[in-house]
Amino acid sequence: MNKDRIRFITRTSVLLALTVVLQYVGRIVPLGPNSNFIVGPLVNACLIISTYFVGILSGVVISILSVVGAILTGAAMPLPLAPFIILGNLSLILAFYFLRSKKILGVVSGAVLKFAVIAISSGLIIPVLKLPPKKTQTMLFAFNWPQLVTALIGGVIAIIVINRLKKNFDEK
């Protein structure tokens, strides 16, 4: 196995593990009703950081497996929505990847795309699930504008981390 492949696997694995641990901690630590506004940005930051430093394939792997991790750690997400959350994550990282030289534009574009994919799909899927009205409203809210906010905050966190770590990665 060559050095680049080992580096890819190692970095992707570390960032995936960090993402899943953040999701799990967000479910077991009592962070209050706004826990999604803490965990969501950190997960989005991991997606963007992996895409920037490791590459598009790393971002894709973490975009997919982070949703699996969320389900396994007890996320209140209807299973039929999982593929659309993955598509939202992929929208975020693809927009960021193609606009990575203009980091802020990449983050904003990706956040808007992620929000659109998740809000539209959840608006179509959640009402069909015939959940209790209060649960339906809670889920429709969670998968709407908070997705835009958490992606934007995560993007800001990612840009800060990228700028701080860039020198270290460029030297190797």
Image: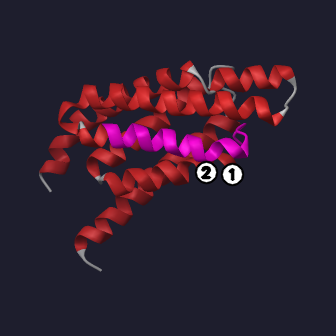
Element on which disc 2 rests: helix
Going by the numbered disc 1, the residue's amino acid type is Leu
165 in relation to 12, above or below: above
**Which disc, if any, is residue 72?**
1
77 in relation to 71, above or below: above
Residue at 42%, 23% (x, y): give it: 153
* Nearer to us in this view, 7 or 128: 128
What x and y, as percent, mark residue 1? 30, 80
Q: Is residue 114 magenta?
A: no
Measure the alpha-carbon separation of dots 2 and 1: 5 Å
2 and 1 marks in contact (CB < 8 Å): yes
What x and y, as percent, mark residue 154? 42, 29
Residue that protrudes farthest toward the left in the picture: 171
| Residue position marked by numbered label 2 in the rendering | 69
Q: In this image, 30 relative to 111: left or right?
A: right
Q: Determine crowd level at label 1: few under 14, some 14-19, many 20+ residues with C-alpha closer than 10 A.
A: few
Q: Main secondary structure of the magenta part?
A: helix
What x and y, as percent, mark residue 78? 73, 40
Q: Determine crowd level at label 2: few under 14, some 14-19, many 20+ residues with C-alpha closer than 10 A.
A: some
Quadrant assignment, res 90: top left
What x and y, as percent, mark residue 150? 49, 25
**Residue 25 visible here:** yes
- Residue range corresponding to the magenta coloring: 72-95
